[in-house]
């Protein structure tokens, strides 16, 4: 919840990547989209925040922030993700 913009842009990237893969494969070019799970980055710290949250979202948003922060903190290190991608 509260991540409609993020989810919709991820979905758009998936569609774009699949379309490119189909268009370019006849030229010997493949397109692969890598979508690792939560990774320990500064993603959460760099999220754009509104100057003022609407009261109706306050409690739920605070809960989501806690969940996201914990998921990122316990995620894989970026180095592990990069190494896994290179080995694939």
Image (cartoon, helix red, strand yellow):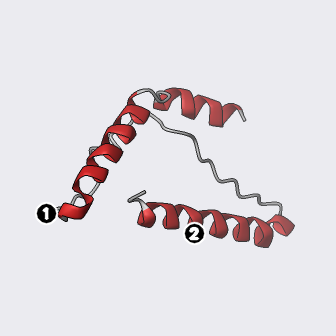
Does 62 sit above or below residue 41? Answer: below
Side of 44 where 12 appears, left or right:
right
**Dot 1 and dot 2 residues touching (CB under 8 Å):** no
What residue is shown at x 79% (from left), y 69% (from top)?
A: 22
Foreground: 34 or 49? 49
Q: CA distance from mark 1 to mark 2?
A: 28 Å
Q: Residue 8: x percent and y percent?
A: 51, 67
The residue indicated by pointer 1 is 52
The residue indicated by pointer 2 is 12
Is residue 57 among what the camera can see?
yes
Total numbered circles: 2
Side of 80 where 71 appears, left or right:
left
What residue is shown at x 38% (from left), y 59% (from top)?
A: 2
Q: Nearer the viewer, mark 1 or mark 2?
A: 1
Examine the image and state in which quarter residue 57 appears.
Answer: bottom left
Q: Residues within 10 Å of mark 1 (few under 14, many from 20)?
A: few
Q: Residue 21: x percent and y percent?
A: 75, 64
Of labels 1 and 2, earlier in sequence is 2
Examine the image and state in which quarter residue 66 appears.
Answer: top left
Image quadrant where one finds the C terminus: top right
Does 55 sit above or below residue 40? Answer: below
State the mark number for residue 85.
Answer: none
What residue is shown at x 69% (from left), y 53% (from top)?
A: 32
Does 61 sit above or below residue 5? Answer: above
What residue is shown at x 13% (from left), y 63% (from top)?
A: 52
Side of 77 where 32 appears, left or right:
right
Does 7 sit above or below residue 72? Answer: below
Image quadrant where one finds the N terminus: bottom left
Q: Residues within 10 Å of mark 2 (few under 14, many from 20)?
A: few
Q: Residue 59: x percent and y percent?
A: 25, 50
Is residue 44 among what the camera can see?
no
Foreground: 1 or 23? 1
């Amino acid at each position: 919840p509260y991540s409609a913009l993020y989810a919709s842009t991820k979905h758009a990237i998936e569609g774009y990547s699949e379309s490119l893969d189909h268009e370019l494969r006849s030229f010997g070019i493949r397109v692969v989209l890598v979508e690792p799970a939560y990774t320990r980055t500064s993603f959460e710290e760099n999220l754009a925040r509104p100057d003022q949250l609407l009261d109706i979202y306050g409690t739920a948003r605070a809960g989501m922030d806690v969940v996201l922060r914990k998921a990122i903190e316990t995620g894989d290190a970026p180095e592990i993700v990069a190494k896994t991608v290179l080995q694939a």
